[in-house]
Amino acid sequence: MESGGSRAGQSGIAIQFCLLALAWGASFLFIKIGLDGLSPAQVVWARMVFGALALGAIMLIARRPVPRDAALWGHLTVVTILLCVVPFLLFSWAEQHISSSLASIYNATTPLTTMAFAAVVLSTERITRDRGTGLVLGFAGVLLIIGPWSIAGEHNLLAQLACLGATTCYGLAFTYLRKFVSPRGVPAVTVAFIQVSAGAAIMVLATPLLAGSPMTLTWPVVSSMIALGAVSTGLAYIMNTNIVAAWGAANAAAVTYVTPIVGVVLGIIVLDEPLSWNQPVGAVLVIAGILTAHGRLTQLSARMKQPESTRTGR
């Protein structure tokens, strides 16, 4: 029997899981609102700076030291360009032309792009039958989401391709992290602080180039940028770290299945965004591809074939 403390701890992790899904799913809504008064690059500037401030405060409170390893900082600067600066710019630019709902659906392809790069770069993650089937299903889902028959205008297509470009950057960044950063054993919170701070430094250095763009700093714009940076970028890293530590990486990755639902629901309810049939159906195919690639459907099928007494433990 679980102790009361253990049950409370698991409940706390479950709450963090739900909050993480909300934070990451809402990030596309925050971007859309921010674009009402800022340029795409200014949105990224705010996201990185507020995210760095939030993580910096957490580092100070936890009294975590900042590593002085120049090689680590170099690797994480590469990571921040691939995992933060470039994809954040692509998503922000894309949301000028497509809905936040659609952008959140495309974000769900990240595990598939990660798997594709990992298969090429990491010897321990070769393409198996399940992974190959999952990639094919995911690719079919992407084609369905794009809906070539219903694309209205060049910018719509380019915006969707920009979202795919962003998740491709994510996939490359996660693979780079596994190969060059994970073996160093640096705590995840410290890694997050360095990479977000490096990204913030890049955007601050670009301030003279961004200052010329007009800004309309309404209350919704400012509050959405604070939430995007401090919550969806800063605190979200901490919650994700806690979930991985408690549940393991595979179970923590299940948040990927929930964030598109949050993004779509918020886009429809808050922004009254339209949703065509092919987008959620394509998203289901993408998620089915992720589950297949990770062997979840094979495990479920094998479990269902077991005698009932074995499945129930009787």
Image (cartoon, helix red, strand yellow):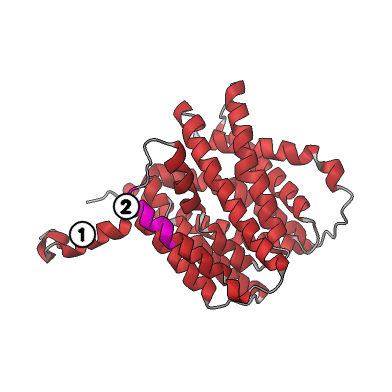
Residue 48, image quadrant: top right
Horizontally, residue 225 falls left or right of residue 38, namely: left
Span colored in magenta: 128-137
* Residue 123 in the image, given as x and y percentages of width and height: 39, 35
* Mark 2 vs mark 1: in front: 2
Of 149 and 293, nearer the camera is: 149
Residue 65, image quadrant: top right
* Residue 251 in the image, given as x and y percentages of width and height: 38, 51
* Amino acid type, label 1: Ala
* Amino acid type, label 2: Arg
Q: Residue 129 carries which label?
A: 2
Q: How far apart are marks 2 and 1 (CA)?
A: 16 Å
Residue 267 to residue 4: above or below:
below
Q: Report the residue at 51% width, 30% height from top.
A: 180
Q: Report the residue at 71% width, 71% height from top.
A: 153
Q: Report the residue at 32% width, 57% height from top.
A: 296
Of 112 and 238, nearer the camera is: 112
Q: Residue 302 carries which label?
A: 1
* Residue 171 in the image, given as x and y percentages of width and height: 52, 46
Asked whether residue 68 is in view, the answer is: no
